[in-house]
Amino acid sequence: MKEDCCDKHNHTANISNKSFDTGKYYCPMQCEGDKTYKQAGDCPVCGMHLVK
């Protein structure tokens, strides 16, 4: 049985100390720092789903 990446790692992002604009999406792994995107999709660096 193939393991899902998230079964092996804790991919929770600590964003309580950061404020993100409503309607902006960002990578939970913060691959590109505080860079945000206008629409949902995948991070161009690591491929994770962007979150609102």
Image: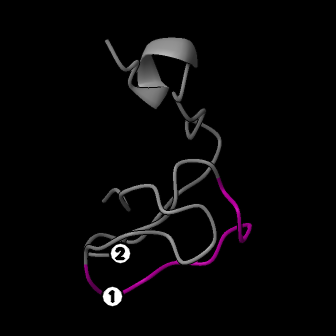
Q: Position of residue 45 (x, y in %)?
A: 63, 71
Q: Is residue 36 magenta-colored?
A: yes
Residue at the disc numbered 1: 38
- Could you tell me if the residues under marks 2 and 1 are in contact, i.e. CB atoms within 8 Å? yes
Q: Is residue 8 left or right of residue 17?
A: left
Q: Position of residue 19 (x, y in %)?
A: 53, 57
Q: Residue at x 49, y 70 (%)?
A: 43
> Main SS type for the magenta part?
loop
Query: Residue 8's spot in the image, x, y percent?
Result: 54, 14
Residue 37 lies in what quarter of the image? bottom left
Is residue 6 shown in magenta? no
Element under disc 1: loop
Camera-nearest residue between 3 and 36: 3
Q: Residue at x 47, y 65 (%)?
A: 26
Magenta span of residues? 30-39
Which quadrant holds the C terminus? bottom left
How far is the residue under mark 2 from the one under mark 1? 5 Å
Query: Which secondary structure, mark 2?
Result: loop
Q: Residue furthest front?
A: 1
Colouring scheme, one of rainbow, by chain, secondary structure, one colour: one colour
Up the image or down, 21 lies above or below 37; here it is above
Image check: 20 left or right of 23? right
Disc 1 residue type (three-letter): Lys
Q: Identify the residue at image location x=62%, y=78%.
A: 35
